[in-house]
Image: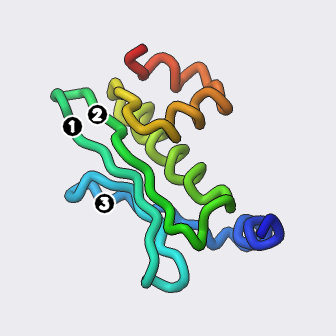
Amino acid sequence: MAQAAQALDANSQIQVEHDRKRRQFVIRLNGSHDRAVLLYEYVGKKTVDLQHTEVPDAYRGRGIAKHLAKAAMDFVVEEDLKAHLTCWYIQKYVKENPQPQYFEHIYQ
């Protein structure tokens, strides 16, 4: 499986789409049949709650959720929002990728 993840990354096939209307980040897998998603909600005018990340079982362990987490955190920074990290995976991602700009935008 590690080779599959490297192949995906090497070919830059992982594209994160931001669906602002549905408040989610999406990666289409295997064409468009399977999807990995990160869901968020606005809980204030400039505050989001990054709620849930889901990757189908067959695609777990390939680093796909990391792409969703990065896209979500980059969105928070770019839009100058504050974020609640309800999702355990986002909490893990931020801990493993300690970017100063992330910490400035997170409710501790």
Q: In this rendering, is residue 73 above or below 18?
A: above
Q: The N terminus lies in which quarter of the figure? A: bottom right
**Marks 1 and 2 close (CB-CB < 8 Å):** yes
Q: Which residue is mark 1?
A: 42
Q: Which residue is mark 2?
A: 48
Q: Residues within 10 Å of mark 3 (few under 14, many from 20)?
A: few
| Left or right of 44 in this view: 86 | right
| Left or right of 47 in this view: 98 | right
Q: Earlier in the sequence, mark 1 or mark 2?
A: 1
Closer to us: 19 or 66? 66
| Residue 75, x across and y down, in percent | 41, 41
Q: The C terminus lies in which quarter of the figure? A: top left
Mark 3: amino acid: Asp
Image quadrant in which you'd find residue 78: top left
| Residue 91, x across and y down, in percent | 51, 31
> Could you say whether the residue bearing mark 3 is in a helix, strand or loop?
strand
Image quadrant in which you'd find residue 26: bottom left
| Left or right of 75 in this view: 68 | right
> Could you say whether the residue bearing mark 2 is in a helix, strand or loop?
strand
Q: Earlier in the sequence, mark 1 or mark 3?
A: 3
Q: Tell me what residue is drawn at x 76 percent, y 73 percent.
A: 4
| Residue 33, x across and y down, in percent | 43, 84
Mark 2: amino acid: Val
| Most distant residue in the front direction | 57
Mark 1: amino acid: Tyr
Q: Which mark is residue 80?
A: none
> Could you say whether the residue bearing mark 1 is in a helix, strand or loop?
strand
Q: Which residue is mark 3?
A: 19
Image quadrant in which you'd find residue 96: top right
